[in-house]
Image: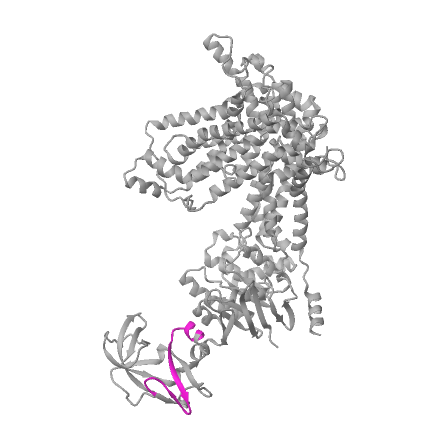
Amino acid sequence: MSKLVLRGIEKRFGETLAVDGLELALEEGEFVSLLGPSGCGKTTTLRMIAGFVDPSSGTIEVDGKVLSSPAGSVPPEKRGMSMIFQSYAVWPNMTVEQNVAFGLELQRLPGAQTRRRVHNMLEVVRMNHVARRYPAELSGGQQQRVALARALVVQPSVLLLDEPLSNLDAGLREEMRIEIRRLHDEFRITTVYVTHDQTEAMVTSDRIAVMNRGRLEQVDEPRALYTRPRTRFVAGFIGRTNFIEGICDGTAIAFQWFSLPRNALPDADGLSGKVVFSVRPQSLRLAKTGAQGLEKGPSIEVTVLERAYLGEHWDYAVMPVTGAASLRVTAPPHEIYEKGQALWLHIDPRWMVPVA
Amino acid sequence: MAGHLRCLIADRLRRFEPGVLLCLALIAVLVFLVAGPMVRLLISSVQETETGRLTLANYRDAYGSLHCLRALVNSLKLGLGVAFLAGVLGIPIAWAVSRTDMPAKSFVRFMVLGAFIIPPYLGAIGWILLAGPNSGWLNRAWMSLAGTDHGVFNIYSMTGLIVVVGLSSFPFVFVATNSALDLVSSEMEDAANILGAGALRTTIRVTLPVVLPAILGGLIVSFLEAIALFGAPAMIALPARFHVVATQLWQFFEYPARVEEAAAYSLPLLLITVLMLWLQRVLTGRRGYIAVTGKGGERRMVRLGRWRWGMLLYALVVAALSLLLPVSVLLHAAFAKAWGRGFSLGNLTLGNFRYLLYEQSQAQQAIVNTFLYAGASAFVAIGLSLAAAYVVSRRLVRWSNSLDLLCMAPLVIPGIVLAIGFYSAYAAPPFALYGSAVIMILAFTVRFLPIAYTSTSAGLRSINPEVEEAVRILGGSRLTAIARVLAPLLKRSLAGAWIMVFIAAARELSTAILLVTPDTRVISVVLLDLSEEGNFEVLAALGTILLAVSMAIAAVGSRVIGRDFMLHRG
């Protein structure tokens, strides 16, 4: 049985539909990210799971028990969850220790046990040396660790995180997302993580649910999401990509420059008519010569339109000799081509994915 | 079937939402306290005294006599004169403190704060001792200097009243001007300088026009203060044999009380206040005109050269007239056997205080009452405004904004009008509150509710709601969140609000004067009686006690909350 189930969740604010028919189920101990641009409804969804917002229709269940429905909801304080907020929401009037102990006090745990668990938890987040300090005396990253400790120490049934790293600077953000994953590996708490940063989602999550305009676009493991995006939005939002159009007819798919047998492409069964394919810049290769036999796919003639050196790789924009739209290609640092140079572009059909 | 299931789920899950109940109770209380008296006031004004039938006779009687019309005109004269004087006194000093290199700025600010704390009626007493015909200090100084036997000053006149009230209300203009000037960046002035405008030209053409709406707002507030005032006019206008609206309203309560006529007569005061405050909102609310960007940027001070000493002299003269002179003569009188006998050791005594604190049981009662009522109403006002501000900021119910309106509404009700409303609504059965401490406390609560509400809601808005949600998700209720997190975080703003309401309520006269009975008298009312008796030594001693307590509490407040908390009020 799934731990947390969202069934047909909808949320209306006046005229606007913030969340539209959301279906999602999390297994016990699973870490799922809600990923999407701002205003896509991901935070509203999280707040509905927490019980701060009631759904307009649909239900939210934990362990098979309905917690939220349009008719009424269990208030947040009776859900046994915990949450980490964008602002950390560390209580400034309590010390680090008191912050972490608060949830246990509310559960009326005996004092000695509370102290032991607080101590252990602060050990885990490496904050014991500042246990007696007030939040105002801590850095942003330290406050974030307090928020984490405070949320984990109560051993919640579900842990909710609302863009917890968006207020940190870049270096700290990288450190903290690894920290969050480490803590998840240690405690295995069912977790929903809201973010607009795809790297954050990919580092931390077992599965990622991509949201757009209140709808769920695709739920998949990070790798599948990148290599097998199912919609144009997902392909464009997770990493960068090229879109090329093909016409599926019988056993062949005809593109502008070449034609491919249907079985050369993954997921191409059952397609018909005009179909858009996503081709990642990493799956394209530039060369000075045409087909060399080693290449499995077709080659087309291109000229270099623009280029940018990004240290870890080159970013080229190339224009097919016969064509109107340019394509993006990622190349290793040692493959240096000049602007205007005529080249061949090799396409590996195994990375061409049809998107809706 | 589906419907049945829905009901089942609904029954099981329907959460007990104390927020809605709290909100309903709160609205009921606020309607009772704020809307009730005002509605009752309007109804009374069109009712016959005996039968309660509809009539316009009250209006005919209230406005039918020349006497009453003259009082209206006097009030307008007073208001305009005071606004003018407050501008002349307040604007230059505010500019000098904010924008120039005038020396001793913090001392000047401190003096203005001091003038704010002196109740206008104590200022009036001070000025009676200073400029009473022939016997006042200034007149006697003049007579001995010029060798005549007639003084030059007569405080018992319209001019005298304007001077007294103007000196006590110029801080309103000062605060408005000063805070607006503090927010204008020097860059705006630099832009004029770079185009070739000198310091004076820049001030007149750029700085002043930009802060003009704020200045006008301050002038309007001092105008409204003046026309709503009861104490100073009662002490000065009545001996001078003229009336203003507030004293005329009081006359209607001479036995037999004509409450309905008073209600009819009080409406112009209410209407003018509503209109003027609306005007003030419009003036100061026009964004884009006022360049208040929040960060003033770095400000360079205008160099006044030799004039800085002239400016300081002006500020010191104003400080002397508004604070130092009146307070000195009051203190002198408080410790004198007879104030007219002047400064000598033989004239020094603690007898006035002994008389008040040990011999005169009425005064003892009044002192206890004053601080009891002020403290209680401060607690009630803060409790109500905290609850209302919470409901409004968390949008617990859809119509929560009506609470906002109810809490701010008393701002437009002059104290004496509020008292008439309370009298006509709750003095008689079924409530029968007349003569009780409750009616005094509730009236003070309503009168100063906007002060409490402004600062509690500002405090609440500065706290991220997530702080509270963090408590709830860990298993704490709203009440736990309020008690364990919000209240501790709001401690300072609540304490500040409490002190402001306490000080304001402790000195309040115009609301008290119509609601007191012998058992519920407060210091301000006793002071008025003593001034009618001409017992200035005892009066000054009682005034000193009131001032000492107010100052002590303000000092604690500024220690706890920050130096200027009184000057930055909403």
Residue A209 among magenta residues: no
Instruction: Give the position of the N terminus of chain A as an image quadrant.
Output: bottom right
Residue depicted at 46% across the width and 88% down the height: A269
Residue A250 among magenta residues: yes
- Colour style of the rendered protein structure: one colour
User: Where in the figure is residue B96, as x and y percent of width and height?
Assistant: 40, 32
- The vertical placement of A168 against B293, above or below, is below
Residue depicted at 45% across the width and 45% down the height: B286
User: Where in the figure is residue B560, as x and y percent of width and height?
Assistant: 53, 39
Q: Quadrant of residue A328?
A: bottom left
Asked whether, in this view, residue B98 is left or right of residue B37, the answer is: left
- The vertical placement of A176 against B186, above or below, is below
- The vertical placement of B102 against A66, above or below, is above
Asked whether, in this view, residue B195 is left or right of residue B76, the answer is: left
Residue depicted at 53% across the width and 41% down the height: B278
Asked whether, in this view, residue B406 is left or right of residue B435, the answer is: left
Instruction: Specify start and end residues of the magenta stretch as a single range.
Output: A233-258
User: Looking at this view, is A334 or A13 the one in front?
Assistant: A13
Q: Quadrant of residue A289?
A: bottom left
Q: Quadrant of residue B157?
A: top right
User: Looking at this view, is B354 or B250 the one in front?
Assistant: B250
User: Where in the figure is residue A259, as x and y percent of width and height?
Assistant: 35, 88
Q: Is residue B499 visible?
A: no
User: Where in the figure is residue B269, as x and y percent of width and height?
Assistant: 59, 34
Q: Is residue B568 visible?
A: yes
Instruction: Give the position of the C terminus of chain A as an image quadrant.
Output: bottom left
**How many badges with numbers are in the image?**
0
